[in-house]
Image (spheres, rainbow, N blue to C red):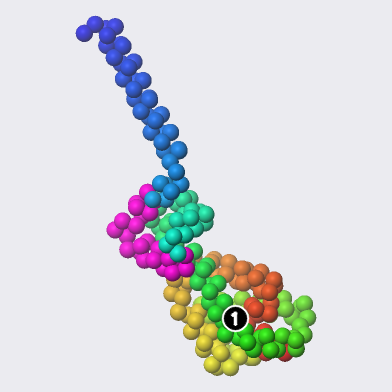
């Protein structure tokens, strides 16, 4: 083969390779979010029972129909660039499950007391300082239950919140059954501080429904 022909063939090969690379890059950049999510779920859920189980737990609070849209908006696609995608997705599912379940637990506690709260609503007198203090106490109370600090619960919080043994047991049972939250706290203790911060913020916006046993404290 002549040198000129060899040179022409080499140029053609380079152009073809470059074209293929550019096409691949373009396809990768322009792939839809739904396709990205499909690939991410496929890569992380296959033969990984932990991720699958965590997803099932989250599906208890998010309908299957809305699931993809929910997790995409919450940032699951950030796990694409993580060195350990499976662990990233697992942590994402568990964190979202923890947040939703935590909110539901608080809602149930509030609903159980709602009738009593409505009756005594007009009797409440509380200073701004007391409200702020008891919001922080309530956050610390919940954290003590998650960490199973029995001494602090019975010796400090029970008398402060004027709660009977039955009330303490009911609240304690609801929170201690949250195995996934305990797992997250064990894996990342800083989450407990985030829980407390979120609780205080929510409590200051709506103290009557978030300070534990509010109506017995300020009746």
Which quadrant holds the C terminus?
bottom right
Asked if 160 appears above or below 93 in the picture, the reply is below
Which quadrant holds the N terminus?
top left
Q: Residues within 10 Å of mark 1 (few under 14, many from 20)?
A: some
Report the front residue among 69 and 214: 69
Name the residue rendered at 42%, 50% in the picture: 37
Secondary structure at badge 1 equals helix
How far across and how far down the image is residue 132, in percent? 72, 76
Name the residue rendered at 74%, 80% in the picture: 130
Q: Is residue 150 visible?
A: no
Report the front residue among 185 and 103: 103
Question: Is residue 13 part of the magenta span, yes or no?
Answer: no
Question: Is residue 49 part of the magenta span, yes or no?
Answer: yes
- Determine the main secondary structure of the stretch shown in magenta: helix
Which residue appears farthest toward the front when viewing the image?
65
Asked if 65 appears above or below 197 in the picture, the reply is above
Asked if 31 appears above or below 115 in the picture, the reply is above
Q: Is residue 139 visible?
A: yes
Which residue appears farthest toward the left when viewing the image?
1
Q: How many marks?
A: 1
Q: In the displayed structure, does residue 124 sit left or right of residue 180?
A: right
Name the residue rendered at 39%, 30% in the picture: 23
Residue carrying label 1: 110
How far across and how far down the image is residue 110, in percent? 60, 81
How far across and how far down the image is residue 108, in percent? 55, 80
How far across and how far down the image is residue 182, in percent? 46, 73
Q: Which residues are magenta?
A: 39-62
Name the residue rendered at 62%, 68% in the picture: 197
Q: In the displayed structure, does residue 95 sit left or right of residue 19?
A: right
């Amino acid at each position: 083969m002549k040198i000129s022909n060899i040179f022409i063939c080499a140029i053609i090969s380079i152009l073809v390779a470059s074209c293929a690379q550019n096409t691949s890059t373009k396809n990768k950049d322009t792939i839809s979010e739904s396709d990205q999510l499909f690939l991410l779920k496929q890569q992380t859920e296959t033969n990984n029972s932990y991720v699958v189980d965590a997803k099932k737990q989250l599906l208890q609070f998010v309908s299957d129909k809305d699931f993809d849209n929910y997790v995409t908006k919450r940032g699951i696609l950030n796990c694409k660039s993580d060195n350990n995608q499976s662990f990233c997705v697992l942590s994402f599912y568990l964190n979202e499950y923890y947040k939703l379940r935590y909110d539901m637990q608080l809602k149930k506690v509030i609903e159980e007391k709602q009738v009593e709260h409505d009756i005594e609503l007009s009797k409440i007198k509380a200073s701004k300082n007391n409200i702020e203090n008891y919001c922080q106490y309530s956050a610390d109370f919940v954290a003590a239950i998650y960490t199973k600090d029995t001494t602090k619960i019975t010796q400090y919080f029970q008398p402060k919140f004027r709660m009977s043994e039955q009330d303490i047991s009911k609240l304690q049972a609801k929170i201690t059954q949250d195995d996934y939250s305990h797992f997250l706290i064990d894996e990342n203790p800083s989450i407990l501080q985030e829980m407390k911060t979120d609780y205080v913020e929510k409590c200051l916006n709506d103290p009557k429904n978030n300070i534990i046993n509010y109506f017995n404290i300020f009746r």
